[in-house]
Image (cartoon, rainbow, N blue to C red):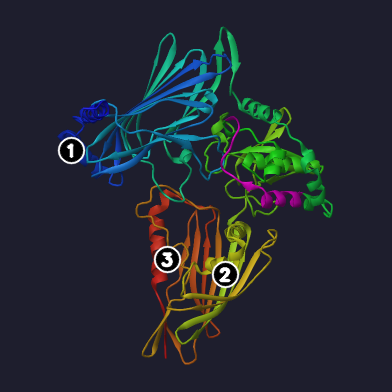
Amino acid sequence: MKKSNLLFVFLISLNMWSQKNTEPSPTEIKTAKELREKFDKSDVAILKSTENVSFEIAKDKKNVEVNYAISEVLLNINHRADIQKYEFYDSQSLINTFSLKYKNNKPANIYPKDEFYKSNDLFYNDARVKYFDLDFPIQGYTYLYDLEKKIKDVKYFTSIYFNDEFPVINKEIVITIPKWLNLEIKEFNFDGFEITKTETKNAEAIVYKYTIKNMPPIAREKLAPGPSYIYPHILFVAKSFTFKNEKTTLFNETADLYKWYKSLVNDMKDDPSIFEAKVKELTKEAKTDDEKIKNIYYWVQDNIRYIAFEDGIAGFKPDDSQNVFTKRYGDCKGMANLTKQMLKVAGFDARLCWIGTKHIAYNYSIPSLSVDNHMICVVIKEGKKYFLDGTEKFNSFKEYADRIQGKEVLIEDGDKFIIDKIPTHDAVSNKEIYTVNYKLENETLKGKVNKEFFGESRASFLYTYNSIKNDKKEEALKWYINSGNKNYNVSNIITSDLSNRDKNVKISYDVALDNHVSSFDNEIYIDLDYDKEYNYLDFSERKENIVFGYKSYDDVTITLEIPSGFTIKKLPENINIKTDDYEIALSFEVKNNSISYHKVFNFKNGTINKNDFESAKKNFENIKNLYAEQIVLTK
């Protein structure tokens, strides 16, 4: 037999030998079935997990490195499962071990993939992801997963979350903090979970052990709060370390965090001469300072493409302004820096700002990189601050996106810093007004529609509209209005100037609505409501707060002229709801031979709290029932 054939036979035999005894035992099958009953939406459970965290001084003695190890037993609790097991890393971390074994501790013949990671959030770096495509052939099947990772600088090791995308049955997290390291552990969202903590001390270190049992999986829910608000986790704040009696301060207080941020800014090599001519062009016709600021701000919004992928020191160092200007793209930091430098050329006091969006629960009382995920610019003029976010493509000057309203902002001020808060707007500032006057022609509702968008409803509309290619704008506008519904026929569309973000957007059009009217004998049945706002909300299995994109206020008036010879036989009953989070009113009124249907939805906080889901479920069921009712006219 040829050597190649012998090698092939050997490899096949080795593979069969490696997989021997990997079939699930009766106990594993029984456990899998029991867990599936408890976690019926999950395919895999983490049966056992051990995480170990330790620290060592880097070779250059300038910072502290982190050794982070995970060992897990993964159990298939469904009939079969296909998952990905992954770990992120970047230029500030290394993955030394990333392995998968069968339950008999023999290597699984599954090879990891390694590639750049891209997403749509705000603060990103040179991120990579390493992952296995993992197949569990039968219920009760088990894999053993091991990870060993080194973080090169402790400031980047900010947190450990106790839950996972899969249910965690048993987990231990062991953190060994040497005496030479001053590190604080902050605990969040422990209430309601099976978490215990022990602390032991010896001459060399303090050892903390967290024991976690029966941790449910992460809820895959839309419109959910950021994970730092809802999931149990610990946050690490490395304050200082001592080597040979010499103390090195890390992030002991907010001033240390700012000092490090500012050091990155000071290392930049901005060259404003590259865009001086553009600044002069943008400001030469401006009659006021506000107009100059707007012209520069809007130019950045319109001409610099926002990208989520970021380079630099763990994604925290802005790109030089001339690079962003020349390339015509940048991340939030690069766009903020370009806005700042262009405004400085124009003679304004412009500064960089670090900020955490409302996705993050923390504030600047915690000196940690986890507090921030965004960067904007501020102009200080005549003692007032005006915040500018170039990534918000259609926000007007002095208007702020809901995601940063009320959030603390860290403003550069030379060697010092300023902490302030972004102003907030109420829901009425984002009002969307909709009026339509219908007449009945045969079994079609025909009418004239007028819509007006304010604040974030305006910005949201403009973003959606302008994201469509230019040659499809008219078609896109029709689709925006009717969502592709062929029963809602739109014509004669007239709009305000859709390139002007300083003005409310106005749209008017003619509409013919089919399949909303039925006639039987001497009666007409009419479904007057086309949009049925918020009927998608479902509280039956909802676990976490609902967080809308912004505080919204919908004011809708639909008028129907009563056909000659007909009277009203039935109108739906009015609804009036007032809670801490929202106020909703739906009412019917007869005026001058017309039926006026008025709807107001005021989500004044932009949220629905999970503690009120029982009442919300009843409230929105009543609204859906009203949507299902019809107006009945009779001769």
Q: Is residue 274 left or right of residue 486?
A: right
Mark 2 → mark 3, Cα distance in angstroms: 19 Å
Please name the amino acid that badge 3 sits on.
Ile
Q: Is residue 522 depicted above or below 219 in this figure? A: below
Between 113 and 402, the residue placed more toward the observer is 113
| Rendered location of residue 218, percent (x, y) | 38, 42
Residue at image mark 2: 434
Please name the amino acid that badge 2 sits on.
Tyr
Q: Is residue 603 depicted above or below 78 in this figure? A: below
Q: Which quadrant does the N terminus fall into?
A: top left
Q: Residue at x 52, y 71 (%)?
A: 598
Residue at image mark 1: 30
| Rendered location of residue 82, percent (x, y) | 31, 43
- Can residue 145 be seen from the camera position used here? yes
Q: Are marks 3 and 1 in contact (CB under 8 Å)?
A: no
Is residue 316 a member of the stretch shown in magenta? no
Please name the amino acid that badge 1 sits on.
Lys
Q: What's drawn in magenta, residue-wise? A: 293-313
Is residue 298 a member of the stretch shown in magenta? yes
- Can residue 383 be seen from the camera position used here? no
